[in-house]
Image (spheres, rainbow, N blue to C red):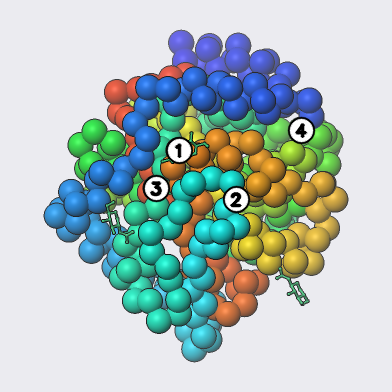
Amino acid sequence: MQLFVLGIWSLVGLAIAHPGHDIQQEIQARARGLEDSPRDISHCAAELKARGLEQRTVERRTEILRGAREKRGLLTNPLSIKARDTPSVLQTNHSSPVSYDPETPLSTIFAGNKSCILMPEVTEGPYYVSGELIRSDLREPATQKGIDLIIDIQVIDVSTCKPLSEVMVDIWAANATGVYSGIVNPGNGNGDPGNKETTFGRGLQMTNEDGVANFTTIYPGHYTGRTQHIHVATHLNGVIFADNNTFQGATVAHIGQIFFDQSLSDSIENDSVYQANQQPVTTNAQDGVFLQEAAIGDPVVEYSLLSDSVQDGVFAWISFGIDVTKSEEIFAAAAHH
Ligand SMILES: *[C@@H]1O[C@H](CO)[C@@H](O)[C@H](O)[C@H]1NC(C)=O
Ligand SMILES: *[C@@H]1O[C@H](CO)[C@@H](O)[C@H](O)[C@H]1NC(C)=O
Ligand SMILES: *[C@@H]1O[C@H](CO)[C@@H](O)[C@H](O)[C@H]1NC(C)=O
Ligand SMILES: *[C@@H]1O[C@H](CO)[C@@H](O)[C@H](O)[C@H]1NC(C)=O
Ligand SMILES: *[C@@H]1O[C@H](CO)[C@@H](O)[C@H](O)[C@H]1NC(C)=O
Ligand SMILES: *[C@@H]1O[C@H](CO)[C@@H](O)[C@H](O)[C@H]1NC(C)=O
């Protein structure tokens, strides 16, 4: 039944995957999805602290950062913790309550409340591919270049403020030069039919008892009409195919997009790999989905560079609230096969 539904919608998905994809239409559909949703999870701060979750979050994120630095031989390099540059996250009234400087304790930084809501909705954008691999490392270095991005994602139930375990977190993003895997994307500078067989930048992880999943991927590039972003969906049910380590969701309750500070993306795009991206630049301030999400929450990840050089990689973290009573079909542009 689900596969049947996905099959039908794949035609629609491919139609809107054309360069003419109407972002205004997507934004309007997202706005409708938001109408009856809670706005953020700041009301959960006290509850999460009381449950000891905040402390474990601090410890986990500290450990991920330390481990990532160690693996890359960067432990003795100076660490560059960057504050979100609130003033440059334009036009919106979302602002960071905490200002960071290099002396700010890690506990303050990692305990941050930055969060947004994944919406119950069906406007996942035109690039969703179903049936992807369950894996934490999405980089595929044999064919893909770019700067490492390690991301810690936490999923919280907006009504109970409890972390949600055993939720399948599904992420997908364009590569350093703004191309998605798994589909043919002529509008994004890659009309190669062979690209349909690729899987880079896509994968799923199940949340643990603290509602957390982590990924290592490549910092995404911009593409025509869009600023750098990562799509996130959560699946509350579906099937794990152990034979080939893939997952087929039955419904997708929540979809959202996460973003980066403009100054971080600017320094990333200064790297020669990203400079090869021929597509026109869209900044956060020019991206309608960014502005829409920023008006109701904070869709920008908090982050630290792994060293003082952006090329050594970025560690980012964010929490999402979801409403477990909401579930929708997801429309896939294609199926991984
Ligand atoms: C990140 O996720 C992987 C795969 O699920 C897990 O083995 C690892 O322990 C996680 N890392 C941390 C620091 O939690
Ligand atoms: C934030 O800005 C949006 C758009 O201008 C507005 O609708 C909303 O009421 C503002 N929220 C607050 C808390 O000021
Ligand atoms: C988290 O949110 C709570 C409630 O809004 C606030 O009191 C606290 O200062 C915030 N903490 C951080 C680190 O932002
Ligand atoms: C992005 O993916 C396309 C299609 O596979 C590939 O041609 C291109 O080299 C990739 N970009 C980078 C920077 O690896
Ligand atoms: C880009 O690189 C140049 C040369 O290394 C440097 O001067 C400039 O500050 C960089 N810009 C950003 C945004 O990082
Ligand atoms: C994985 O196995 C399932 C069940 O047999 C199948 O439907 C799916 O197409 C397979 N996926 C891939 C990528 O081979």
Residue pointed to by mark 1: 296
Q: Residue 321's spot in the image, x, y percent?
A: 35, 39
* Residue 115: image tag: 3
Q: Residue 207's spot in the image, x, y percent?
A: 34, 45
Q: Earlier in the sequence, mark 4 or mark 2?
A: 2
Question: Disc 3 to disc 1, how far (Cα)?
Answer: 11 Å
Specify the amino acid type for callout 2.
Leu
Q: Earlier in the sequence, mark 1 or mark 4?
A: 4
Rendered view: 68 above or below 29: below
Question: Disc 1 to disc 4, how far (Cα)?
Answer: 33 Å
Question: Disc 3 to disc 4, how far (Cα)?
Answer: 33 Å
The kind of secondary structure element at disc 2 is loop
Q: Earlier in the sequence, mark 1 or mark 2?
A: 2
The kind of secondary structure element at disc 3 is strand
- In screen coordinates, is 150 left or right of 210? right
Q: Earlier in the sequence, mark 3 or mark 4?
A: 3
Q: Residue 50's spot in the image, x, y percent?
A: 14, 55
Q: Earlier in the sequence, mark 2 or mark 3?
A: 2
Rendered view: 138 above or below 121: below
Residue pointed to by mark 4: 184
Question: Disc 2 to disc 3, how far (Cα)?
Answer: 18 Å
Taking the spot 53% from the left edge, 11% from the top edge, the residue there is: 4
**Crowding at label 1, few (<14), some or many (≥20) Cα neighbours within 10 Å?**
some
View extreme (bottom): residue? 76
Taking the spot 40% from the left edge, 38% from the top edge, the residue there is: 117
Question: Disc 1 to disc 2, how far (Cα)?
Answer: 14 Å
* Residue 334: image tag: none
Q: Nearer the viewer, mark 3 or mark 4?
A: 3
